[in-house]
Amino acid sequence: MLEHITIEPKGDAQAAIIWLHGLGADGHDFEPIVPELDLEDLNIRYIFPHAPERPVTINNGEQMRAWFDFQPHTETAGNEDIDTSAAQLMEFIEAQMSAGIPSHRILLAGFSQGGVIALHTALRYPARLAGVMALSTYLHDPQGCEAALNDANLAIPVFMAHGQGDPMIPIMRAATARENLIRLACDVEWRDYPMGHQVCMEEIEDISAFIRRVL
């Protein structure tokens, strides 16, 4: 299993959120968000995995933490890396189930690259999940997702949030992902904010409300 950070609730964990960071960051990136969500009463265990280091084409082959090798202007580049990362995320889901948390109390979250993996995994997972938070991200290979879609996660709640001025992943790419997810029968909640490739306080409040709703 990948190295990761775990934040335990004060009481026995009743739910788990597995949260994947973006390109070049690590599991510590979203650690500070936990107290801001103000969800202590739900007894959530938060897990923040660190992506492996790999050479990334967009950064001249430099090694950095990445869920897959990002190559711009390609729809299916990184397929093998994405499948590997999805399998690693499934290990975390299964570990939580072994620890006594049912799959429908496990929520996946990811920012940017991490969101690609969270969506890719949730659509294929063979047991019902609580939902997905897809932050400043997109859907990789929609046709492949449609072919691999598992009925267990039909109508899964998906929270999509995006910056209106995102220079890394244009909002139109996210909007296209939203339409594809709706076509795949996901229950999509969409929010956009006057920001770039980041997270804002209003978004954190909306994330908190989504988590409370699905858990």
Image (cartoon, rainbow, N blue to C red):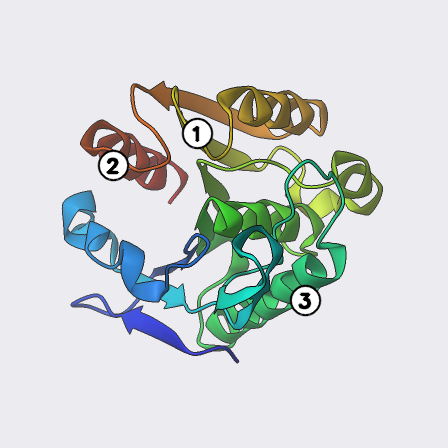
Residue 128, visible in the rendered structure: no
* Closer mark to the observer between disc 3 and disc 1: 1
Residue that label 1 marks: 167
In the image, what residue type sits under mark 2? Ile
Amino acid type shown at disc 1 = Pro
In this rendering, position of residue 208 left or right of residue 214: left
Q: Position of residue 176 (x, y in %)?
A: 63, 22
Q: Residue at x 44, y 49 (%)?
A: 109
Instruction: Give the alpha-carbon distance from disc 3 to disc 1, as whole Å.
Output: 27 Å
Residue 204 numbered mark, or none: 2
In the depicted structure, whether residue 115 falls above or below residue 143 = below
Query: What residue do we see at 65% from left, 47% from top?
Result: 71
Instruction: Give the mark, 1 or 2, whose residue is nearer the N terminus.
Output: 1
How far across and how far down the image is residue 214, in percent? 41, 39
Please tell me how crowded label 3 is: few (under 14), some (14-19), or many (20+) other residues with Cα within 10 Å. some
**Other-residue count near label 1 (Cα within 10 Å), few / some / many at <14 / 14–19 / ≥20:** few
Assess disc 2: are there few (<14), some (14-19) or many (≥20) residues with their C-alpha within 10 Å of its C-alpha: some
Mark 2–mark 3 distance (CA, rounded to whole Å): 29 Å
Horizontal side of 111 relative to 200 (left or right) equals right
Question: How far apart are the alpha carbons under marks 1 and 2?
Answer: 20 Å
Residue name at image x 60 percent, y 66 percent: 90
Q: Of helix, strand and loop, which one carries label 3?
A: helix
Tell me whether circle 3 and circle 1 mark residues in contact (CB < 8 Å).
no
Please state the horizontal and vertical placement of residue 205, each as a whole percent of the image: 22, 32
Amino acid identity at mark 3: Thr
Query: Viewer-nearest of labels 2 and 3?
Result: 3
**Residue 8 sits in quarter:** bottom left
The front one of 105 and 73 is 73
Mark 3 — residue? 84
